Amino acid sequence: MKHRLIAFAAALFSLAALSSAQESRWSPAGNRIMTPWAKEVSPENVHTEYPRPQMVRENWKSLNGLWEYAVTDKLAAEPERYEGEILVPFAIESALSGVGRAVTGQDAIWYKTAFTVPKGWNRVKLNFEAVDWKAEVFVGGVQVGTHTGGYTHFSFDITPYVKKGSVNTLVLKVTDATDNDFQPRGKQVSRPGGIWYTAVSGIWQSVWMESVSATCVEDYYAVSNIHDRTVDVSVSVAGAQAGDVVRIALLDGGVGYSTENQPHEFVQVVSRADAAPGVTVTLPVPDMQLWSPDSPYLYGLDISILRGKVTLDRVKGYTAMREISVGKSRNGVKLMALNGKNLFQFGPLDQGWWPDGLYTAPTDEALKFDIQKTKDFGFNMIRKHIKVEPSRWYYYCDQLGMLVWQDMPSFSDNKQNIWGVHNYDEGTDFPATTLAKANFRKEWREIIDQTKKFPCIVVWVPFNEAWSQFDTREIVDFTRDLDPTRLINMASGGNWTRDCGDILDNHHYPYPAMRLWDRNMINVLGEYGGIGLAVEGHLWQPDRNWGYVQYKNAEEVLAEYENFAGQLIQLVTQGCAAAIYTQTTDCEIEVNGLMTYDRVVKLDEARLREINTRVIESME
């Protein structure tokens, strides 16, 4: 017994030493400003939360942490020796990756890690939340799959290629050409400056694995009908056999939960139904509670696959009862309605960038912080600007009650303004290649399919200004076919195509103004503002920053913000249905955020909230 205790103590000491060594090998790269959450990040504490709150299974394991990495020519084979370690899931260019290194379109980033499969697991599903841009995945030296697209998650069943009870190797090869006028990349460029930011390459969201059955839930989609007080739920099932049953329960209480939240005994069943795989179920919702920014009520979903009396798979999720539609003013002007009532949608342009993690928030708490602060400021909407966030970001918007306009990341910038930016009337298309157009449709489809489960999203925005805008009518129809339940903003501030989509979107800086009105459309102000304030000690580049207009102190900024709000209220009385203020935070050398890049609030929150509430309530 004594010898066993000594051996056990020695093992604990070895594990502690290994953990300490791992942490000592990693530190943030560079000397840029950092957010307060950066100090909480370590190889042992890096995005440990369940990544997909709408598809929760009990048995899962995070693979985030220190991986080996190397950069080679994109045509080279896997290197025999790796260069060092990188903290996944932070992009190689970021400080929190521990590398802080730029890569080019001629490079390949190699990642390598080891993992073991927990005892008792059935089949093993390997999940990547997002990798920018082309990922080739190898398990045990065998290529198990390839994925292109920097914003969507992808998965592989790796059961045949893992050895249970043994250490397995996982290798990833990533190539990313960034600004090549082909792949969607939003604000990323190889030479950042102005409104263009540092490129993000490789893994930038969580990597994890879970135990699944050969017959399992692949996905589900719930569509609410508030007039009939019902919700339609469709479930896609992999490996289904004749006689299998999909059991769906709508839950009241314990909703929107993931594995760390309240136990299931507090959940009450509202309604349930059994169906064959592939059949859409309509569930009644008596005593219906609507979701809105003022009351973000969520219903839980419990979905099981049964074969006889055996439960093959079970996932937890949620949905909401809400409707976004076209409303009308007393004068017949088209507006935006939520749950049948006109609502002025007002929020900031949210870039979703971080000084320490770039595309990746340092922690889950930080990810939620921006949404909570937007709510505290009195806004009811966020325009997610040419970026797609991790699933947990939308989860928090659902929980907190934040409407979202979701942009498609553009694959080109506004080079020399030669493709009709702000032309507003049948402008010239961006000269996209056939291949680029096909890839745009492929990635936009994947983005919509991935995010349409989130009730917070109320508007799709396929194009921003005229950046890579092409075949507008066709893309609007394509979007409508993918999801007919939301409104479509054909091109925020871009080339206007008549009789296309639901929304006509003006951009005007710095003060709010509408260049164009159309009685047949919902008229919105998709961008304005950009009031700059450089806060010493909180600047990405202290000697180089800009805003559309700049002031010396917070009092001056708030006075101008209130002045703009007064002008905006006049536009609301004329029929403006929504407005987007630029922007949530500073981003690199841009200093026109309501918060600094490292998340210090610049303005008096109570006063800001009072002004924004007044704007929202100005709609009759």
Image (cartoon, rainbow, N blue to C red):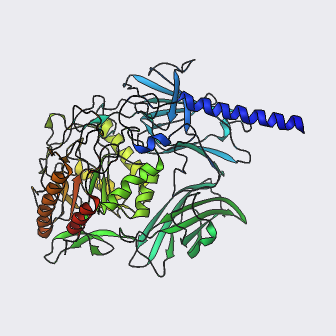
Q: x%, y% of residue 411?
A: 29, 38
Quadrant of the image containing the C terminus: bottom left
- For the point 20% across and 45% down, the residue is 533
Above or below, comparing residue 518 to residue 357 in the picture = below
Q: x%, y% of residue 470?
A: 23, 44
Q: Looking at this rendering, what residue extends furthest in the bottom direction?
A: 287
Above or below, comparing residue 569 to residue 51 in the picture = below
Q: x%, y% of residue 42?
A: 53, 38
Left or right of residue 367: residue 547: left
Left or right of residue 116: residue 171: left
- For the point 77% across and 32% down, the residue is 10
Q: x%, y% of residue 306?
A: 67, 63
Q: Looking at this rendering, what residue extends furthest in the right direction?
A: 1
Nearer to the camera, 466 or 430: 466
Res 196 visible: yes
Res 403 visible: no
* Total number of numbered discs in the rendering: 0
Nearer to the camera, 86 or 203: 86
- For the point 49% across and 31% down, the residue is 27
Left or right of residue 178: residue 139: right
